[in-house]
C-alpha cells in the first residue's frame, strides 16, 4: 500500500486523479519536498480561493467541527436557487454560534425588484426553515454589490472569533471570499494572507489580523440541484448570467409549457390568467396543449426540447409529476435550480414535471 500524503496547508489527503475534488495536486507536486494541494497553492500564491466539492460524510465532519467551535457562521445561498442551495441541516449543527445569511447573485433579479422586500422574504423563509440569522444580506459577489456591508457585519458580529463560511457548490462562495479578500487587502487589513497556518481538516483558514481566521469550507454538493442532470456544456443555458427578464404567458386550463426538455408545467384547472416565468433568458419555453404534451415530449426531447442532449437521453432521468393546488395569491412554483413561475390568482390546480431527484415546490412569491 502506498503511504498517505497530507497537504501541509489544510491537512487534506492528497490525490492526483480528480482535479475538482478535495486534495487534488498535480503529480509533479509530489516530487516537491513540501507537498501542498492545488487549492492551498492558489490561495497562497494568487490570494485566490478555488472551488472544490465535498462528499456528505466530509460535510458532516465539518458541521460537527463548526458545532463545537466558538465562531461566527456566514451561510451563503444562491438567490436564484434559494431552496435548492439552502443546506437544510445546518441549523442543527450551529450550536450557540451566530449566523449571518447572505443571498448571493442579486444582480440576476430584475432591476425593478426592491432589495429590502427580498431580504424580508429571506428572513421569513429562513425562520420557517428553522434558522434564525442575526442579519440577512443580499449581495452580488461578482459585481461587488453590498460586500463592504457584509465585511462590516462580519467584523461587528464575530467579536474576536473565527468565521466559518459555508454554502453548497455553485452558490458563489469562492467568488464571495475572493471578493472579500480583494475588498479588504490594502486597507485596514481585516484579513491578511501573510501567514499560512496548517490545520487538521479539509478546510482553508485565511488569517485575520487578530490571530483568528476566516475559514473557507469546501462546497457541499446538493444532489437535488438541476445542474447535476445537465451536460456541462448546457449549464450556460440553465444558469442565468445576467438580469433575468420575466416572460409572461396568458394560459387557459389545458395548456402546457415546456422549459427546454428539462421541465414541464400544466395548467390543470382554473380561470384564464397570466403566469410570470423567471428563467434564464437562454432557456427555450414552448407552449402546447396538455393533451398533446406527452406525445410532443416523446417525439422532440433532445431536439426541439433541449437540453437534455440527444446523446444524453438514455441517462437522463424521467420527468416526474408533482400536483399542486394553489390556494393563495402571489405564489411561486419553483423548479429547483431552473427558475420559477409566479401565479397571481389563487384557487387553481397545476402539475409540475421535473427530472427524478430534482425538487419542485410552491412558496410565497419572492418578487
Ligand atoms: P462556489 O462553488 O460556491 O465556490 O461558486 P463559484 O464562486 O465557483 O461560483 C459559481 C458560479 O456562480 C460561477 O459561474 C460564478 O461566475 C457565478 N457567480 C458567483 N457569484 C455571482 C454573482 O454575484 N452573480 C452572478 N450572476 N453570478 C455569480
Image (spheres, grey):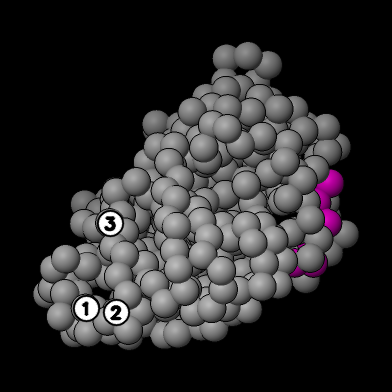
Residue at disc 1, secondary structure: helix
Q: Could you tell me how far apart the alpha carbons at marks 2 and 1 are, in whole angstroms?
A: 5 Å
Percent x, y of residue 214: 65, 42
The local crowd at label 3, few if under 14, some if 14 to 19, many if 20 or more residues have their Cα within 10 Å, is some
Q: Could you tell me how far apart the alpha carbons at marks 3 and 2 are, in whole angstroms?
A: 16 Å
* 13 left or right, relative to 237: right
Marks 3 & 2, CB-CB < 8 Å contact: no
Residue at disc 3, secondary structure: loop
Give the labeled residue for mark 3. Answer: 284
> Which callout, 3 or 1, points at the residue further toward the start of the chain?
3
| Front one among 351 and 109 | 351
Q: Which mark is residue 293?
A: 2
| Mark 2 close to ligand 1, CB under 8 Å | no
Residue found at x 44% / y 37%: 243
The range drawn in magenta is 129-134
Marks 3 & 1, CB-CB < 8 Å contact: no
| Front one among 253 and 1 | 253
> Which callout, 3 or 2, points at the residue further toward the start of the chain?
3
Give the labeled residue for mark 1. Answer: 296
Residue found at x 75% / y 58%: 126
Figure quadrant of the N terminus: bottom left
Q: Is residue 15 above or below residue 56?
A: above
Amino acid at each position: 500500500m502506498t503511504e498517505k500524503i497530507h497537504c501541509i496547508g489544510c491537512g487534506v489527503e492528497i490525490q492526483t486523479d480528480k482535479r475538482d475534488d478535495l486534495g487534488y495536486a498535480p503529480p509533479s507536486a509530489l516530487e516537491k519536498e513540501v507537498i501542498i494541494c492545488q487549492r492551498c497553492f492558489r490561495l497562497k500564491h494568487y490570494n485566490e480561493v478555488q472551488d472544490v466539492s465535498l462528499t456528505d460524510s466530509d460535510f458532516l465532519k465539518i458541521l460537527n467541527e463548526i458545532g463545537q467551535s466558538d465562531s461566527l457562521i456566514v451561510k451563503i445561498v444562491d438567490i436564484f436557487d434559494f431552496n435548492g442551495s439552502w443546506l437544510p441541516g445546518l441549523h442543527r449543527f450551529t450550536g450557540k454560534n451566530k449566523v449571518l445569511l447572505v443571498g448571493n447573485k442579486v444582480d440576476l433579479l430584475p432591476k425593478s425588484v426592491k432589495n429590502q422586500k427580498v431580504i424580508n422574504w429571506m428572513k421569513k423563509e429562513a425562520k420557517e426553515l428553522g434558522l434564525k440569522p442575526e442579519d440577512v444580506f443580499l449581495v452580488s459577489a461578482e459585481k461587488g454589490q453590498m460586500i463592504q456591508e457584509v465585511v462590516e457585519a462580519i467584523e461587528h458580529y464575530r467579536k474576536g472569533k473565527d468565521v466559518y463560511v459555508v454554502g453548497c457548490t455553485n452558490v458563489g462562495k469562492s467568488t464571495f471570499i475572493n471578493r472579500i479578500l480583494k475588498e479588504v487587502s490594502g486597507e485596514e487589513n481585516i484579513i491578511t494572507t501573510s501567514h499560512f497556518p496548517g490545520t487538521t481538516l479539509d478546510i482553508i483558514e485565511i488569517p485575520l489580523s487578530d490571530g483568528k481566521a476566516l475559514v473557507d469550507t469546501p462546497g457541499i454538493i446538493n444532489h437535488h440541484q438541476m445542474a447535476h442532470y445537465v451536460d456541462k456544456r448546457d449549464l450556460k443555458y440553465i444558469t442565468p448570467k445576467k438580469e433575468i427578464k420575466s416572460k409572461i404567458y396568458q394560459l387557459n386550463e389545458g395548456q402546457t409549457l415546456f422549459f427546454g426538455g428539462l421541465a414541464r408545467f400544466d395548467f390543470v384547472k382554473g380561470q384564464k390568467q397570466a403566469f410570470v416565468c423567471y428563467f434564464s433568458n437562454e432557456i427555450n419555453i414552448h407552449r402546447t396543449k396538455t393533451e398533446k404534451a406527452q406525445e410532443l415530449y416523446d417525439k422532440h426531447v433532445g431536439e426541439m426540447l433541449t437540453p437534455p442532449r440527444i446523446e444524453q437521453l438514455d441517462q437522463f432521468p424521467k420527468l416526474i409529476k408533482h400536483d399542486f393546488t394553489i390556494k393563495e395569491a402571489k405564489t411561486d412554483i419553483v423548479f429547483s435550480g431552473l427558475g420559477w413561475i409566479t401565479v397571481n390568482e389563487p384557487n387553481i390546480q397545476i402539475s409540475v414535471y421535473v427530472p427524478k431527484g430534482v425538487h419542485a415546490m410552491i412558496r410565497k412569491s419572492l418578487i
